[in-house]
Every structure is written in structure tokens, then in C-alpha cells.
Amino acid sequence: MLDEFAESQKSYVTSQFMTRRRQFSKAHLPGIHEASADQAALDEFNYLWATQESRLRLIPGKEALSYVNNHLQADYGVSLTERSIIDAMRTEEVPDEMAGLIESLRNFSLLHLE
């Protein structure tokens, strides 16, 4: 189901990827020819798009969840919410970066309470 969504979003994701890479190239590689930068960006995008794991990292998450939710509702009469996903997750499934960010936000919020 997510692969189907990813394929339907490939043009959009490609254009977003290209835009971001072009901005990066202009800021950090000012001497590079635009066509060369675009070619490098397309090569990188195609490399990332080739595997399911990296492809799923490129697609817009909110829209992907909406797509899955619409199919689950239509096919099974089940609704999937962000909250139900969070409630179903185990601590070891949360990436270290996300856990660190959550901890930092918690610590920051406590500073303002004192």
C-alpha cells in the first residue's frame, strides 16, 4: 500500500528533492554548473528511490498516513489516527534521534515551569 502511494507521489517527491538540492548547491557549491548539480541530484534521488526503506523516508509522511487511513476505512472500516499509532509503539521502536528530541523538549518545558 505504501509502495503504491510512493509511486503515485514520485513526480512530486522528485521535484521537491530537486528544489532542495538546487538550493543547497547554490549556497554551498557556487561554482558548480546547474546542469551538473541537477544531474548529481537526479542520480542521488534515483539511488535513494531504488530501495523501499529509503523511498519511504522521502515520501510525505502526513499524506502517506492519510492515504493508508483512507484505504483502511474503505476496505476494513477501521480508522487509524496518529494517537493510535503512538499508543501502539514500543519504546525500542522510537529512533534515538526522536527520543533525544522528545527528551530535550520535555526538559525545555520544565525550565519554564520553575
Image: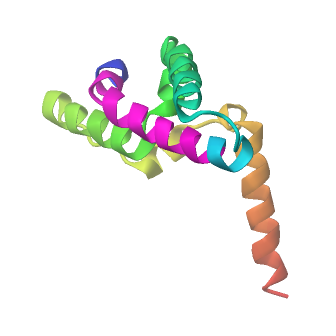
**51 magenta-colored:** no
Residue 6 rendering spot, x and y as whole percentages: 36, 25
Q: Position of residue 85 (x, y in %)?
A: 47, 42
Q: Quadrant of residue 73?
A: top left
In-image side of 107 versus 63 (left or right): right
Q: How is the image coloured?
A: rainbow
* Farthest residue, direction top: 50
Residues 69 and 25: in front is 25
Instruction: Give the number of marks.
Output: 0
Q: Farthest residue in the bottom direction? A: 114
User: What quarter of the picture does the N terminus occupy?
Assistant: top left
Per the image, is 15 magenta? yes
Q: Nearer the viewer, residue 58 or 31?
A: 31
What is the quadrant of the C terminus in the image?
Answer: bottom right
Q: Residue at x 58, y 37 (%)?
A: 89
Magenta highlight: main SS: helix
Location of residue 54 in the rendering, given as x and y in whole percent from the top left corner: 56, 22
Horizontal and vertical percent for residue 107?
82, 68
Magenta region = 5-24
Position of 111 relative to 5 (above/below): below
Residue drawn at (74%, 54%) of the image: 101
Residue occupying image coordinates x 72% and y 40%: 29
23 vs 5, left or right, is: right
Residue at horizontal 49 percent and vertical 11 percent from the top: 50
* Image vertical order of residue 35 relative to residue 110, above or below: above
Please state which of residues 41 and 8 is positioned toward the viewer in this rendering. Answer: 41
For residue 113, above or below residue 75: below
Q: Is residue 90 shown left or right of residue 5?
A: right
